[in-house]
Amino acid sequence: MSDFAELTFDGKQYKFPVITGTENEKAIDIAKLRDETGYITIDSGYKNTGATKSAITFLDGEEGILRYRGYSIEELAEKASFLEVAYLLIYGELPTSEQYAAFEDDIKMHTIVNEDMRKIFEGFPVNAHPMGVLSALVCAMSAFYTGEKAGSDDLNIIRLLAKMPSMATWSYKKSQGHPVNYPNNSLDYCSNFLNMMFALPVAAYQVDPVVSAALNKLLILHADHEQNCSTSTVRLVGSSQASLYASISAGINALSGPLHGGANQEVIEMLEDIKADGGDTDKYIAMAKDKNSGFRLMGFGHRVYKNFDPRARIIKKAADDVLSKLGVNDPVLEIAKKLEEAALNDEYFVARKLYPNVDFYSGIIYRALGIPTNMFTVMFAIGRLPGWIAQWKEMRANKEPIGRPRQVYVGATAREYVDVANRK
Ligand code: CMC
């Protein structure tokens, strides 16, 4: 295999280096393309564009492989705690027991959120979408932790991991008309979140180990996914040297879209609609295939996975386990399975390599855990936080230049200004 690629163009020859990753992924380094040829590349949606070299997550969409720092997602989801995975992603290695204890203690030291942040929160309407609230509050942190309060990157990383779950629960409490709960530092990360969500001043909440184990697994499955839309957003915003908070807030906004993290909410709403419509899955499969219907099968398809999404496999099994352990009988699980079976045997979906993605079954589990539908994408954000942080940290450590794509201009050519009175 040659270590450079040749381009013959307008009678001239150019050579560009070939880069090989540790998993034998190949790329042509075109950094000098414009300098040497005067041309740029165009790649709408960045389907072929590598934005960076990263040592965090490996993903093989053809083989359905996902690894964080070399460890398989299957093994981590089975054996690790979410905070261990967060440490692994952010610092590159699994923590020793001393490192783990120190990391957990540091996070516990910072779970309390500044009371002035609550005043900002109180201004949101009761039915505000929790993703909009979360992104605004994380962005507000950039105003709170600035100047002499700024602190090191490591301190800001801890602050975010510690405070984001607390702030996420506020929206739910407000929607119920209940007071918000303070964190309880005697609980582990997932149990603390559940306690803030569900404890009431009048009734203590006993964390069910089945529920906290399921949450732990879901957060791990969401923890990183290399250069997806929200992660690329975090890196791009951070590349201007904007703060970690500003960058993560931008990532939350990118995640909120229905084609990205917002899909988990859309899936449940779609399944509910199908149920209310008599459960006729064939009708919805037909609609998804009809380009004029404007309907897509939410939770299906992925830009990179073209065989199966390994996270979806784990989540499908977890959905069965969790629902049966909790004794929950959710009719939409059956509708989801029927849809999946129909799609996997349908030429349209087979030809386009459309398979269930991570969002297809996750909402069913969240619902069984008592999480309301409009909080599903917030759960995704809590899970993805360590990945965003790790990617931001790597981008800074590698001193990557400010991100600044180019374009091919297709607008009007030069013309003269006409005074408003003379315009037709
Ligand atoms: N239902 C019906 N048709 C689909 C679907 C779907 N869910 N997804 C893709 N297609 C069709 C699409 O119409 C196109 O058909 P054709 O070639 O005839 O024009 C073909 O499949 C390729 O689709 P694409 O939109 O060019 O593919 P993409 O890689 O740009 O988009 C995607 C990937 C995930 C945005 C898309 O599959 C989709 O919209 N899925 C539904 C939303 C969803 O579940 N998103 C969560 C993604 S995983 C978690 C995350 O990223 O947060």
Image (spheres, rainbow, N blue to C red):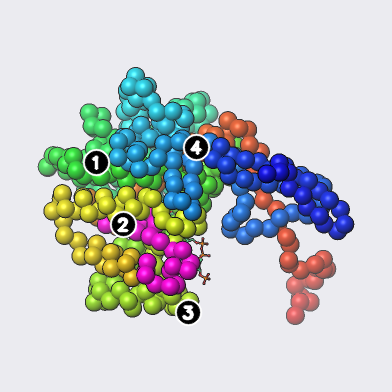
Residue tagged by mark 3? 292
Q: Quadrant of the C terminus?
A: bottom right
Image point (45%, 36%), residue name:
70
Amino acid type indicated by mark 1:
Ala
Pointer 3 and pointer 1: residues touching (CB < 8 Å)?
no
For disc 4, the neighbor class at 10 Å (few under 14, some 14 to 19, many from 20) is many
Amino acid type indicated by mark 4:
Ile
Q: Where is residue 299? Give x, y as percent.
A: 38, 61
Image point (44%, 57%), residue name:
307
Q: Where is residue 423? Give x, y as percent.
A: 76, 77
Amino acid type indicated by mark 3:
Asn
Farthest residue, direction right: 11
Question: Which region is colored magenta?
Answer: 343-366
Q: Could one spot residue 119 in this view of the protein? A: no
Farthest residue, direction top: 98
Cβ at disc 1 under 8 Å from ligand 1: no
Residue tagged by mark 2? 361
Give the mark, 4 or 3, whose residue is nearer the N terminus.
4
